[in-house]
Every structure is written in C-alpha cells, then in structure tokens.
Image (cartoon, grey):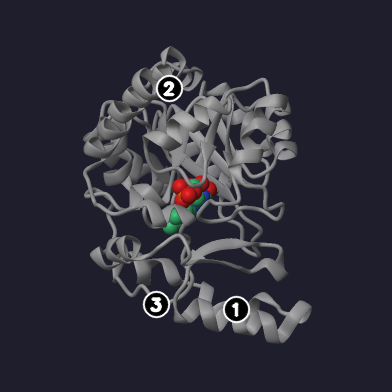
C-alpha cells in the first residue's frame, strides 16, 4: 500500500511502532522495520546519549531498513541532555525522529539540517497545526483511546482524525486504539496516511519485555484501563492494578491539593520493574483501551502481514462489494 507516509519514510507498509519507554529497544524497532513498517527506539529509555548511540548501532546491525528514534520532551526538574541525544541521533545516521510531549521547536533546526524527517505526536488539532507551522514533516494524531498520555481534551479518534484531516496540510498517522486491518482501513477512510500502534506491538514475540506483561495484555479487556494524574494535568492511560487503584484513591482523597510527591511510589521508577522484572503490579504503566482487541502474540512480521492482507481484503471485497452489490 502506497501512501504519503510510506513515501516520506521510504517504507513498504504505512504502519509505525510508536516510542514506548522500556519497550522500544533495538530488537522491537528492527523487527517492525524488517517487517516493512517503521520501528522506533525510545531515546530516553537510554540513560545517556552514549547509550542511545550504542542502541542505534545495535539496531543498524539488525536491520538495513529505516527506523525512528523517539524523543519525548517531558516537564522535568532535571531535564535530560537533549542536545547530546540529538547529536547521537544525527551521528547515528537515523532518518526519522518521532517527537512527543512539548513542541520540538528547539531541536528542529538541527534535525532538519541533517535531513531527518520529523513526525510529532500530538493529541489535539491545535498542537498538530503548531507542529506543521514549525516545519514537522508529519504528525501522529493520538486520540483519547491511546495508551500513555492522551492530553486533556478527551477527543476520541472518530472525531479527532476527521478534524485533523480538515485542517492539516502535512500527512498524519492515526494513533491510539489501532490494532488490525479494520483500524488501518478506517483511519485511511478518515484521512490518515497510515497508523501508529503502541500497545499492540507490546504483545509481539520480539517485544523485549517480560512474558508477564504480554500475558497481562492478553488477559485484559477494553474495560481495564484507567486515567491517572489528571489532577496534575499530566493524564496517563494505564492498565488497572492494585497500585493504580491506590493512586486513584489518593487522587480522590487529596483532590486539587495533590502533588507529584504524593504519588511518587506508584509512578516513579516503575518501568524497569514491570517491563524487565515482570512485576506488573509495581505501579502505573501505560496501556491503551485497544488491549481489549489483543488476543495473540505474533511476530511483528506475522502481525504486519496479517494487517496488510486483511486490509486488502476489506477494501477489495467488503468495501468494493458494497458498491457493486
Ligand atoms: C508502555 C508504553 C510506553 C509508552 N512510552 C512512550 C514514550 O516514552 N514516549 C512517547 O512519545 N509515547 C509513549 N507511549 C505512547 C505510544 O508511543 C503510542 O502513542 C500509543 O501507545 C498509541 O496508543 P495505543 O497504545 O492505543 O496504540 C507509550 C505507550 C505505551 C503503551
């Protein structure tokens, strides 16, 4: 399938794997890219710019295809050394950067001078327009369904994607709640040029995370995610567990007086414990509502092949058949 995104990134299928903390390591990024999509190394999971340079080199050993690096700009008391991370990305010869969080204006000149394509992930049309205005090549539009940070507007993709299509000139990927061929075809019908998936790619053979996490995804339904940290205006969609229930109880009891320190036990340092050690109840970790649509652990190649085969069938038979019938 050819779209503006396959052309922009030089890939075969319009499917991206979004950056995921402690999930987006070289193994997963390379597997997605080798399967014809575009995989993403999560920059800040690497503790230093030197570590990121090594991870990029590892990924290049595993694939000749284009892959991306995610740079997430979070509010932080001790911000990471972003210029050093950008240098590692440029010197590593990376062709695509997925930015997220705050707008990436400060790093744009360096990335553009190096010929890197920038796709900014955003949760509203106004942020997408801002990304377009500062020179991003594309955006990923993350609806309310998404795993991770859906923003504070709560607009689901059935509304957000057509709104993005109405306003944007640059191409965009649909993100949040995407799982299969139906997601891809529906996204394209709503004006997107492909889709970005997070949670679905966690339940793959190559995702370098503990089996307990994959099993938790298989066991969960679409009713099992919760929104946390809304009172801090840092809303995150996570899989429910006892730690998340504790966190929500604190939010209820402390109301608008709640501070980050009050919930630090449930949110700080959680990812290595969950993803590497398999302690799925260690705290709050991102997970999308799409978890209700995931019931197997294929390889990335099997997953992407299946999506593309079924998307073709959907378009050529079901949709064309409706017209001919
Ligand atoms: C476990 C997990 C960790 C994530 N970490 C990040 C991150 O560090 N930076 C980022 O930009 N997005 C992050 N995301 C968001 C994904 O890149 C993607 O936008 C989102 O998962 C799409 O929604 P879906 O899960 O419904 O497919 C994360 C998502 C998950 C599930």
In the picture of the structure, the residue carrying the numbered disc 2 is 319
The structure residue drawn at horizontal position 35% and vertical position 40%, both measured from the top left corner, is 56
Above-or-below relation of 324 to 12 = above
The structure residue drawn at horizontal position 52% and vertical position 41%, both measured from the top left corner, is 175
Q: Position of residue 144 (x, y in %)?
A: 60, 51
Q: Position of residue 257 (x, y in %)?
A: 77, 81
Q: Secondary structure at mark 1?
A: helix
Q: Which mark is residue 124?
A: none
Q: Which mark is residue 281?
A: 3
Q: Secondary structure at mark 3?
A: loop
Residue contact between numbered discs 2 and 1, judged by CB atoms under 8 Å: no
In the displayed orientation, state which residue is furthest to the front. Answer: 325
Task: Point out the image quarter for the N terminus.
Answer: top left
Residue contact between numbered discs 3 and 2, judged by CB atoms under 8 Å: no
Gap between marks 1 and 3, in whole Å?
14 Å
Dot 3, crowdedness within 10 Å: few (<14), some or many (≥20)?
some
The structure residue drawn at horizontal position 71% and vertical position 29%, both measured from the top left corner, is 134
Gap between marks 2 and 1, in whole Å?
44 Å
Q: Position of residue 15 (x, y in %)?
A: 40, 32
In the displayed orientation, state which residue is furthest to the right. Answer: 256
The answer to whether one can see residue 130 in this image is yes
Is the shortest distance between ligand 1 and the CB of mark 2 under 8 Å? no
Task: Point out the image quarter for the C terminus.
Answer: top left
Comparing marks 2 and 1, which lies closer to the viewer?
Answer: 2
Q: Position of residue 164 (x, y in %)?
A: 67, 31
In the picture of the structure, the residue carrying the numbered disc 1 is 248
Tell which circle, 1 or 3, labels the residue nearer the N-terminal end: 1
């Amino acid at each position: 399938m050819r779209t503006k995104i396959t052309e922009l990134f030089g890939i075969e299928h319009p499917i991206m794997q979004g950056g995921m903390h402690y999930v987006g390591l070289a193994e997963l990024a390379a597997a997605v890219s080798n399967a014809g999509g575009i995989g993403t190394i999560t920059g800040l999971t690497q503790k230093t710019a030197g570590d990121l340079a090594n991870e990029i080199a590892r990924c290049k050993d595993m694939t000749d295809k284009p892959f991306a690096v995610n740079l997430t700009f979070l509010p932080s008391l001790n911000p990471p050394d972003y210029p050093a991370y950008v240098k590692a990305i440029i010197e590593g010869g990376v062709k695509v950067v997925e930015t997220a969080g705050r707008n990436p204006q400060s790093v744009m000149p360096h990335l553009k001078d190096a010929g890197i394509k920038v796709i900014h992930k955003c949760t509203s049309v106004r942020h997408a327009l801002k990304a377009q205005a500062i020179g991003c090549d594309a955006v990923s539009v993350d609806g309310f369904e998404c795993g991770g940070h859906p923003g504070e507007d709560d607009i689901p993709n059935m509304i957000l994607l057509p709104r993005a299509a109405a306003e944007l000139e640059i191409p965009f990927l649909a993100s949040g709640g995407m799982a299969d061929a139906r997601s891809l075809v529906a996204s394209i019908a709503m004006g997107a040029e492909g889709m970005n998936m997070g949670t679905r790619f966690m339940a793959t053979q190559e995702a370098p995370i503990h089996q307990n996490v994959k099993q938790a995804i298989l066991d969960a339904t679409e009713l099992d995610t919760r929104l946390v940290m809304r009172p801090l205006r840092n809303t995150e969609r996570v899989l429910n567990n006892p730690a998340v229930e504790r966190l929500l109880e604190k939010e209820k009891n402390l109301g608008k007086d709640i501070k980050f320190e009050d919930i630090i036990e449930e949110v700080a340092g959680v990812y290595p414990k969950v993803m590497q050690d398999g302690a799925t109840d260690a705290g709050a970790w991102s997970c999308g509502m799409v978890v209700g649509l995931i019931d197997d652990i294929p390889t990335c190649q099997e997953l992407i092949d299946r999506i593309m085969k079924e998307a073709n069938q959907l378009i050529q038979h079901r949709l064309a058949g409706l017209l001919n019938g």
